[in-house]
Amino acid sequence: MVVSNLTAFFLRPGDDPAADAARGSALWRVQSWLALVLILAAAGYAVRFTSGTPDRDALYKTSTAVGALFQDGVMLMIVFGLAGGVSFFALRHPASWSRAFGLALLALVVIALVAAGLEAVLHAGSEQGLTPDRWDPSRKNAYTLNFIVVAAFVPIIEEITFRGVGYSLLRRWGAPVAILGTAIAFALAHGLVQGFPTLIVFGATLGWLRYRTGSIIPGIAVHATFNAISLIAAVTS
């Protein structure tokens, strides 16, 4: 009975695997998505190993927001093209909003606890270098713009790319492959070393949430909330 309950909790599907498999039947879509991930990973790690010390004031610069908008805008157009439309995006409402809210809250707590625990050991925050060490009111406009991009725009694009299109394409090989595969891809695309374990947990948890709810909307909410809390904490603690 205990095993059955645990299986139902972790593996009860909220999506339609048959429909996902049918939509993702063209292998070239999978190959194209994997190629995109590899390009993002190569670019990310190239920057990681050649750029030196991260710019701690990046979020105080308007150019950072503009660059992120451009990069993610291009990525959205690419995934839209290889998906052949929005059917792969999973931008549909969950079967139960109340259940989705509870699962999203659980996912946020798990991600926050794991991230805090790993940060104490791996110091991934300093590796990425996005969050500043202090609040500078003279540059609040640029920070506000970057806050909106990082806490709203980026989570939408990344969830569409990984838990939306990526998950739909990999679902043909089963939910575990889709969850773990998109988690690895998500982590690689960020081009981090110390942050890799945290990103794996982050991606896998949101993949599980996508599987449980059949939608990326709860994952977008969790992703956006986590980013927003991190950015606020960086300048207030």
Image (spheres, rainbow, N blue to C red):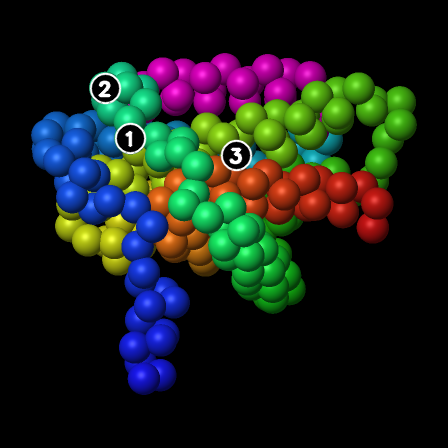
Q: Position of residue 161 (x, y in %)?
A: 37, 32
Ranked by sequence position, the earlier of labels 3 and 2 is 2
| Foreground of the two, 32 or 103 | 103
Q: Is residue 11 visible?
A: yes
Above or below residue 214? Residue 52 is above
- Residue at mark 3: 155
Q: Characterize the magenta stretch by its predominant secondary structure.
A: helix
Answer with left or right where residue 78 lies relative to residue 158.
left
The residue tagged 2 is: 84
| Residue 205 painted magenta | no
Taking the spot 40% from the left edge, 34% from the top edge, the residue there is: 92
Magenta stretch bounds: 59-79
User: Judging from the image, what secondary structure is the residue with disc 2 in?
Assistant: loop
Give residue 203's position: percent from left, percent from top.
43, 49
What is the distance, in whole Å, between disc 3 and disc 1 at their CAs? Answer: 17 Å
Amino acid on which the number 2 mark rests in the picture? Gly
Query: SS class of the residue under badge 1?
Result: loop
